[in-house]
Image (spheres, rainbow, N blue to C red):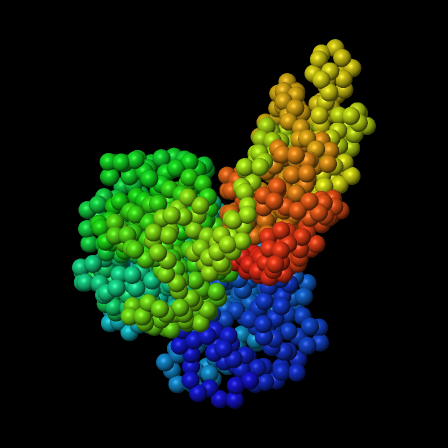
Amino acid sequence: MLSTITRLPVYDDDEVGVFHPICESALNQALSNLGLDKEFKVLHHEAVGSLEADFALIRESTRKYVLFIEVKRKPAAVSSTRYRIQAQSYVQEAKTAVEKPYYAITNLEVLDIFKYDSSRPSVTQQIIEPSPVRIGTFSDNPVEFFNNLVKTFEDIITIVVNDSGTYKELTGSFIPLLENNKTNQQRWHQSLLVAGYEYIRGVMQASKRNMTWKAALNYKNRPNKLVENIRSVNFSSLVVPPLPASKDSEIWNTSMLEDLVELGKKTMSGDGLAELVHSIAVSGREHEGLVPTDLELANILAILSKYVLGRELNENEIICDPAAGSGNLLAAIRAGFDTINPKQLWANDKEQLFLELLSIRLGLMFPLIVSPTNSPLVTGKDICDLNKNDFTNVSVVLMNPPYVSGVKDPITKKKVAKRIFDISGTMSKTNIGQVGIEAPFLELITNLVKDNTIIGVVFPKQYLTARGREAEALRNYLLNDFGLNLIFIYPREGIFKDVTKDTVVLIGRKNNPSSKVKVIKSEIPLAEINLTKFKQGLNNLKTNSSIHSLAYGVDVRELNANELHQKVKDGWRSLTNVGQKIDNWINSTLIPISEKLSGVHNLKKGRIGNAGASDLLFINSNHKLWELVKHIIPKDWLYPALRLVKDINNVFVNSSTTDVRFLAPCEKAFQTGTKEYSILEEILDIYEEVKAESLVKTKQPKKIKTKEELRKILNRERKKITSPYTILIPRNIRRYARVFITTESAYISTNVIEVTGGTKDQKWITFSWLLSIFSQLQLEVMSKEQEGARKTEVGSIKDLLLPKFENIDNKIVEKLINETETRIGFLDLCNPSTTTIDKLWAEVLSSSKPEEILNQALFLLEEKVNERYPEYLVSDDDE
């Protein structure tokens, strides 16, 4: 416990080293003051299931939790829906170990407390009084601040111990009001006009701005006067018609409006209301790409954009976010542009439900100076309706485009591509194949802005490293038109929990390609980066390009753009230090003695799974169906099969190692009048009955294939049998390096890549190579990373290197085959260890220093897997 508080934190201080000790000391002091220090105990960094809570309060006698506390560094983080959900997850994870379901989040200056209730699904519905609690500011006297913090914890602990938490009126009226009007744009606007007025009034009062605004209810019968007040400050999106009717009791709810003005006073910014409104607006629509940018990432994007710009903005220059969402990117802009004025911000988003919250949030960044002549611009246009003239004064663009599959939304992608053609007179350069909408979205914005505009964008990492024509086209575009200048790589921890793609930050200068590209990599979570030191490091980098470290855990290196051009086709594996080391290792160790996998074998995707009726083909995958038909099916109609890679825990695929069976009726089963035809007819009758029953239970529309369609599928698919000694490489793994070989005829799903061709000995040798750490190291860099998984396609591994068969000593060949024939399990990529197979291959690669080669590959594999999948669980398995 801290004996004295000599100084208060600053926002860039280390969270664990500075914020946590103050919080822990105040909690313990509060328990002591209440006389509860013998009954309850404060636990720091408490493991809760698979999670770790900053602080937990437990009852000593039962060891059960009564309160969890999550500590952040900035007030905006306390209002963040994502961080609130993080704090809530401790209660959910603890389950029966919870005595009282309370959780809180604080940056020490402000605190919100919640009470978990599964009947209140939204975290905003679980907030209780007296949230938000304003404790003070870090500019206060340290002793007075600490005493206020202790008093706050005393009040909170008393509520928790007595289980006397009451939900805020705001959650009981304002949230339902908005939720019930998401599809009624007129009433949504009317609700936010009045609610926004009171919230703004609260912030302005707390900020000591001299104003004469009265409570909203004074203008109930003359709402035009309320609008007049707002217009005097200029929150433009609020002051458009229609105005609310005076008889609308829900909108003019006295308790709700009183709560909103108090909320504004306590938060003193637009962040709290913006987070609340945005969470309601996007609920159930996350699949549309409506996910807010993390605040820490927004800070980094602002800082890096300013660094690449290299100067202060002139008074008439504008920073724009063309897909602003809830406004997180622009709300964090002062992390990089600390002298920005309100009129230098432009937020655009086509989602009309965001316009009011953007106007409120961005305007309240400047409560003392925002005015009709000095206000942020908020527009609600589709980006395809924006023109070049709109961007005349824009010098910096910051954006986090929607990540939506081009397959799922081809109409939008086509619309964006057409707009690119209209502006540039040329076809889109990035609208290739199945590319996501984010690529042509970036291209369109780049076409709209003037040359030398700085563009900072959060973008899926896979485009930088993956093979394929889509990624190749995007890399070319980045180096040329986008003018790639800087890449920032960071760990996934805590970032975009609702997004399945790892992301990076890209900074470019339109049509001004750089001869050098800086690659900055953070080894620590963004929340732990000291931004003050980070900015100092960037400033030092301007005069000393030999610097390798910008701040603790953040390194920088410089790549020649020509090198990136040369690697456009194969992907930029060398962006990270470990990627560069692997490239060097492959070039020096493998290339001189190897040949390509596709030069020795044929590669194709497994063939079963695209025709539909998988639950009929893999006949025992549906337990109910199997129990009804297993006594009918002739044994010679059933074959071993691989449907899901995790179903088989042996390297060999045969009748003994897999329980999955494929239904492959004989030829006569498709000839009318035969006994076999009647057997199949009975199976299909039962299948249709089971299918119809299951669809009724799930209330799905009935789309049962006819028996004739099912016969055609069975007759076609039964011919796609895979022969013995076919190697199978899974297309999606996470932790275990599964590789299989068939030892009898089997049916194989599209979840794997089949490797065929070559002699039997060649197949065994190739199989042993694929089981080795040397092959797995290559697969790690050749495959695409997605949310910790390793995604592999035929095109990405055709150039996988394997030592030339004819140059391998016959004795080693014999040993490799013997070892492979007795192999059972798979390499644990998260805890790799070497096997006899690895040692034999090390001798092939270097007879003079096999141990050194082995250790190098093992180290690189560990580093690469940790980069892809740093937070694995013991229970993790593959897809």
Closest to the observer, 820 or 160: 820
Q: Quadrant of residue 813?
A: top right
Closest to the observer, 418 or 809: 809
Q: Is residue 548 above or below residue 695?
A: below
Left or right: where 37 falls relative to 192: right
Q: What's the residue at 58%, 43% (across, down)?
A: 804
Q: What's the residue at 70%, 33% (across, down)?
A: 724
Locate residue 128, reporting x and y percent.
Answer: 51, 66
Q: Is residue 254 visible?
A: no
Q: State the residue lying farthest toward the right.
A: 631
Locate residue 763, reporting x and y percent.
Answer: 65, 38
Q: State the residue lying farthest toward the bottom.
A: 3
Closest to the observer, 755 or 378: 755
Q: Is residue 177 above or below residue 98?
A: above
**Number of numbered discs overlaid on the protein picture:** 0
Locate residue 697, reporting x and y percent.
Answer: 65, 35
Left or right: where 255 falls relative to 659: left
Q: What's the residue at 78%, 39% (across, down)?
A: 656
Q: Quadrant of the N terminus?
A: bottom right
Left or right: where 38 falls relative to 865: right
Closest to the observer, 307 or 721: 721
Q: Is residue 6 visible?
A: yes
Q: Is residue 253 above or below residue 113?
A: above
Left or right: where 379 falls relative to 581: left
Q: What's the residue at 66%, 55% (across, down)?
A: 839
